[in-house]
Image: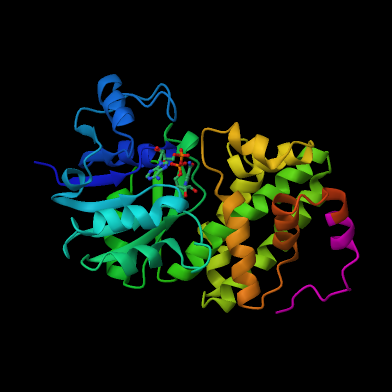
């Protein structure tokens, strides 16, 4: 009998990872909407998020959180960042200290400025450990077995290594890192930078602009990360540079897509209301801007995106402000 894993969240990433894990484990995927759970079980396919990919035999979908978590060796949290706290509160009663929790969610909670694994850790008292799994991995490609890489981060490296073994397949190579702060900050902030890169695409600026935005975006990620306690080296890794490249350049990136539409003149509300999937950079632009203010970290690109999204400021005014900033050395704290 294969060991069981639970995947909490049946969106594109949760469902992709659930199918990947089903090559080694018996998988139960939890979906918060009971009707959707029933439909997924009947159709044996996620027509909304992963059309054309059949669920394997050892794979069930449920809306019952307790039964999903019971006897699971690994519990993967794969819901959008706005739902992580409520899911943690609801799941805590079912989790015990032999179970490993993995978060694949990318974001910083506004107000508390907690990373996703910090929220889970603070709400779920009994568990073996919490791991952040993050990197340049679009569901659209991993679900088609396109060779990809990712990093499993945990202060306790032995727990990260267990997760590494669980997720390793012939098309997904998993690395480990102790720097969970750096991995989660990189994961959250790159979505904000990707919206800005998308704006540049939407306006029709060139490769020079995109390269500048990605590089100066990375400078912002590093400044915030170091102040929050991360190791700078992490940002040249998969959860830093790797994820920034894919999110700013890929046709699959929802955050880049949001930016592209903003650059073409659409309003943020029309863009988000027309999207089925979550673009974490929109909400996280606000939490990251507020977090940076709290830590007194300068993040000019993030600040300008905040003005565009939340204060309806003009993109061209933002550009003028960015180009009239005081002269700087390339590297400053
Ligand atoms: N899609 C990717 O390629 C990818 C890759 C890596 C990481 N991620 C991250 O994984 C997380 C989930 O992304 P996704 O792409 O699977 O999202 P998605 O937009 O495809 O799906 C979101 C899922 O969350 C569910 N949901 C909505 N509201 C909920 C609530 N209140 N409580 C519980 N569940 C709720 C929806 O039913 C849906 O199943 C995000 O943080 C994202 O950044 C995504």
- Residue at horizontal 13 percent and vertical 42 percent from the top: 2
> Is residue 147 found left or right of 293 in the rendered image?
left
* Quarter of the image that includes the C terminus: bottom right
Q: Position of residue 320 (x, y in %)?
A: 90, 57
Give the residues drawn in magenta, as a range: 318-333
Quarter occupied by residue 322: bottom right
In magenta segment, residue 35? no
* Quarter of the image that includes the N terminus: top left
- Front position in the image: 169 or 163: 163
> Is residue 3 found left or right of 117 in the rendered image?
left
- Front position in the image: 208 or 37: 37
Q: Position of residue 213 (x, y in %)?
A: 75, 55
- Residue at horizontal 45 percent and vertical 48 percent from the top: 80
Q: Position of residue 258 (x, y in %)?
A: 66, 40
Provide the major secondary structure of the magenta segment. loop
Image quarter for ligand 1: top left
In magenta segment, residue 330? yes
Q: Position of residue 250 (x, y in %)?
A: 62, 40
Question: Does residue 99 lie above or below 66 as drawn?
Answer: below
């Amino acid at each position: 009998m294969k060991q069981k894993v639970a995947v909490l969240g049946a969106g594109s990433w949760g469902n992709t990872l659930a199918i990947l894990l089903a090559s080694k484990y018996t998988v139960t995927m939890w979906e918060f909407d009971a009707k959707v759970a029933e439909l997924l079980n009947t159709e044996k396919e996620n027509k909304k998020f992963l059309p054309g990919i059949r669920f394997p035999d050892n794979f069930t979908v449920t809306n019952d959180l307790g039964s999903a978590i019971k006897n699971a060796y690994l519990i993967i949290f794969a819901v959008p960042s706005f739902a992580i706290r409520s899911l943690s509160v609801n799941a805590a009663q079912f989790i015990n200290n032999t179970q490993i929790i993995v978060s694949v969610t990318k974001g910083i909670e506004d107000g508390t400025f907690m990373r996703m694994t910090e929220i889970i850790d603070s709400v779920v008292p009994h568990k073996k450990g919490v791991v952040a799994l993050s990197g340049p991995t679009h569901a659209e490609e991993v679900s088609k077995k396109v060779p990809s890489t990712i990093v499993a981060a945990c202060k306790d490296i032995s727990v990260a290594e267990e997760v590494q073994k669980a997720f390793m397949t012939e098309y997904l190579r998993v690395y480990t890192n102790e720097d969970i702060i750096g991995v989660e900050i990189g994961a959250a902030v790159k979505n904000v930078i990707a919206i800005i890169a998308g704006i540049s695409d939407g306006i029709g600026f060139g490769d020079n602009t995109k390269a500048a935005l990605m590089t100066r975006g990375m400078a912002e990620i590093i400044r915030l990360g170091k102040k929050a306690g991360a190791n700078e080296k992490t940002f040249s890794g998969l959860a830093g540079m790797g994820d920034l490249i894919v999110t700013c350049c890929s046709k699959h990136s929802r955050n880049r897509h949001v930016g592209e539409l903003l650059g073409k003149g659409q309003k943020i509300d029309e863009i988000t209301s027309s999207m089925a999937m979550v673009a974490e950079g929109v909400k996280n632009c606000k939490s990251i801007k507020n977090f940076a203010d709290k830590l007194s970290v300068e993040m000019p690109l993030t600040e300008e995106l905040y003005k565009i999204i939340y204060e309806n400021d003009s993109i061209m005014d933002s550009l003028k402000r960015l180009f009239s900033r005081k002269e700087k050395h390339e590297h400053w704290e």
